[in-house]
Amino acid sequence: MSGEGEGRQQKKRSKQEASGQTAQEKKEQKHLAEAKWAYLEQNKHLFQRMESEPAMFQNPEYKFIREFISMVELNRDIFPRRMGDKYYDAFSAPVGEDKGIMLTKGYVTKVAQREDTSAIVEEPILQVVERETRYRGSVAMKREKNGPTSVQIQFTHLRLCDGDGNIIVGRVVAHLTHEARKLNRGDIIKLPLFTELTHRMGTSKPMPAVFIAQFEKIGYAILAALFPSLVHSTIALRRSV
């Protein structure tokens, strides 16, 4: 090899050493990048199929996907949506006095003290802290040959916070369960039609609660942003005199 050729090879080796990468390492990195891209495209194709064929979502082999999505939706303060994403605007209604949406302050305290809440608000605005939808057995009125038919009815229970960060239990009327089960942690709802009542869990003291006959989702906000130290226990009801 001529001196000029050896010089070029030495220069090439020096350049590789300076970059800290050999040709083989660059090749491996390129291969990994291509494999990652192919993997992401494969998953993207799968989710696009699910979007066009919703029945696929219920397939047993996709249980891990369903469970991951549920975990994310229950922890939106940890996994927030990102601006620029396809459905970001549908969930990003701002909350604050300057934005026209304000969680009702003093509402839970008024209910707990058995005071008239209409003095402060007609349609309270609350935020979803937790949602639980479960089946409850019931017996239909119509009797079959073998006796009454047992049916399963779904009920949705909510833990809601007001503008002070105080918690109230909400139970949604049965015929709205399908809509209520779409609610997620952080969603902001307005209650045009409701009944205030009490709620007791086991042997605990009665707690303020609200039976929701009508609700309207009006926005979303990360809970941690509104209440860094959210009150996680309900306020006990004041004894009637």
Image (cartoon, rainbow, N blue to C red):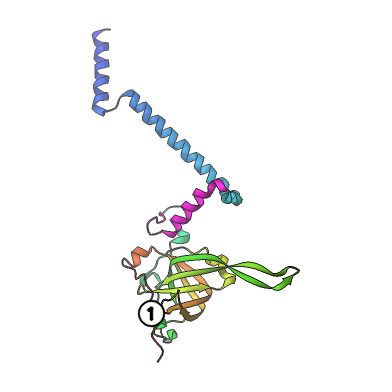
The picture quadrant where one finds residue 20 is top left
Looking at the rendered structure, the kind of residue marked 1 is: Ala
Where residue 52 sits in the image (x, y, percent)?
59, 49
Residue at screen point 35% across, 74% down: 164
Residue at screen point 40% across, 82% down: 237
Where residue 75 sits in the image (x, y, percent)?
41, 58
Residue at screen point 65% across, 68% down: 150
Label 1: how many Cα within 10 Å (few below 14, some 14–19, many 20+)? some
| Residue 62 lies in the magenta-colored region | yes
Magenta range: 60-82
Q: Is residue 98 left or right of residue 179?
A: left
Q: Image height check: is 140 above or below 16?
A: below
Q: Residue furthest top?
A: 1
Q: Image height check: is 240 above or below 166?
A: below
| Residue 155 lies in the magenta-colored region | no
Out of 234 and 79, give the one closest to the viewer. Answer: 234
Label 1 secondary element: loop
The picture quadrant where one finds residue 227 is bottom left
Where residue 117 sits in the image (x, y, percent)?
43, 84
Provide the residue designation for mark 1: 236
Q: Image height check: is 101 above or below 238?
A: above
Q: Residue furthest front?
A: 146
- Prevailing secondary structure class for the magenta stretch in the rendered image: helix
